[in-house]
Image: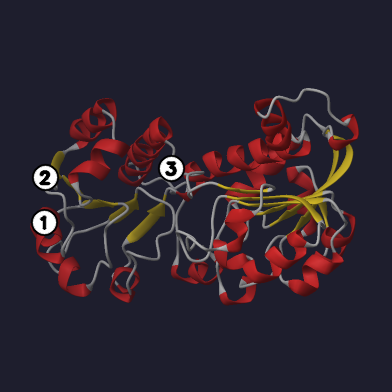
Amino acid sequence: MKIALLMNQKTRQDTFTEASLAKLRSLGEVSLNETMGAEPDIVKAVIRDADIAVTSWGNGSLTADILDCALGLKLVAHAAGSVKPIVSDALFDRNILLSSSARVLSRGVSETALGFTITAAKNFYALNQLVHDGGWKHDRRSITELFDITIGVVGCGFAGAHYIELLQPFDVTILAYDPYQDEAKIRALGAQKADMERILRESDIISLHAPSIPETRHMINADTLAQMKDNVILINTARGSLIDEAALYAHMAAGKIKYACLDVTDPEPPAVDNPLRTLPNCIITPHLAGQANNGLGRIGVHVCEEIMRCLGNEPLATRVTREMLSTMA
C-alpha cells in the first residue's frame, strides 16, 4: 500500500511529527513531496499509484488529470481545515472517500474564542494599558465575571460545539443559533436553541462560529448591530466575511461595543488604513486561532487515525460528502 503526502516540505514538517511519520510508514510505503511547492506536476509525481493521499494548505484541486495518476485511490485525508481548495467533481464521482481535519483545528479556534471571552469580559486589554501608562486604580464595574450573563453562540459546528463545551464550568446562560442543528442536538451540547433575534437581543457576549457561505455574508451588519445590547462583546474566530466591517466601525465609534475581538478580517490582512486598527477596544489577531505552532501536531495524529479507520473498513470520524460542502466553511 502507498500513502502519498502531497503538501510541500515545510507544511509536512509543521504538521507531521516524526512519530506520526513513523506511524504512516508502519502502514505502508510513504511517498513525500520534498519540494517547497505543490504544482500539479509535482503532485502527479508524488501521488502516482497511491492508495491514500494526504493534502494540506497549499494544495490545489485534485482534478481528474491528477486522479488519473492514482486509479486505485481510496481516501484523501485533508490535513487542514476547509476541504474546498482541494475537492473536485472527479473526486466524488470516483467514490473516493474524503476526510477533513477541521474538527481537530476547531479545538484551537474554540480555545481562542474562550480566551477572548475571558480577557475581554475582565477588561484585561484596557487595564493592561492602564498599568503600562503608570496607573493602577480602576473602576471595578468595568470587569465582568462569567457569572449570571448570557453568551450567544452563532454556529454549532465543530468549533461552536467545542466552545459551548468549554463554557460548561461557568454559571452562564448559553444560547445557540444554528439553522442546521435541531433543538435536541443543541440541548445535548449544553445550550438553548434560539433564533438570531434572541441572540442579538439578550446576549452579553456573542461568539461567531458560522461558515462563510452566501447566507452568512455580513450577517453582522448595521441592522443586527443595532439590535445588540450596549456594551456587548463580539468575538469572531470564524470568517471575516461574517461582519460588515464599516458598520462595525461605526457602531464601535459610537461607543456601543465593549470589545470586538477578531481573529479574522475581510480581506486578510486588513488594509493598513482600516479604521478598526485605530480602536483600542478592537482586538485583532492575525488569523492564528486554528494554526498555532505545536497544536498542528494534532492534525498528523488525526490523519493517521483516519487512515487506520479506512484500512480497517471502519467509518471515518470526519468524513466529508459532496452534499455537506454547501454548509461548510
Return the disc, 1 or 3, that comes first in the chain's sequence: 1
Which quarter of the figure has residue 49? bottom left
Residue at position x 58%, y 77% in the image: 214
Residue at position x 81%, y 57% in the image: 255
Q: Where in the figure is residue 26, as x and y percent of width and height?
A: 20, 30
**Amino acid residing under circle 3:** Gln
Residue 132 left/right relative to 22: right
Task: Sort mark 2 into few (<14), some (14-19) or many (20+) by Cα contacts within 10 Å.
Answer: some
Q: Nearer the viewer, residue 198 or 254?
A: 254
Mark 3 = which residue? 291
Return the disc, 1 or 2, that comes first in the chain's sequence: 2
Q: Is residue 237 above or below residue 129?
A: below
Element marked by disc 3 = loop
Residue 262 left/right relative to 194: left
Mark 1 = which residue? 49
Q: Is residue 5 above or below residue 172?
A: below
Which quarter of the figure has residue 242? bottom right
Q: Is residue 6 visible?
A: yes
Q: Is residue 104 above or below residue 319?
A: above
Q: Where in the figure is residue 224, as x and y percent of width and height?
A: 79, 69
**Amino acid residing under circle 1:** Asp
> Marks 2 and 1: in contact by CB < 8 Å?
no
Which mark is in front, 1 or 3? 3
Element marked by disc 1 = loop
Mark 2 = which residue? 34
Task: Sort mark 3 into few (<14), some (14-19) or many (20+) by Cα contacts within 10 Å.
Answer: some
Residue at position x 48%, y 63% in the image: 271
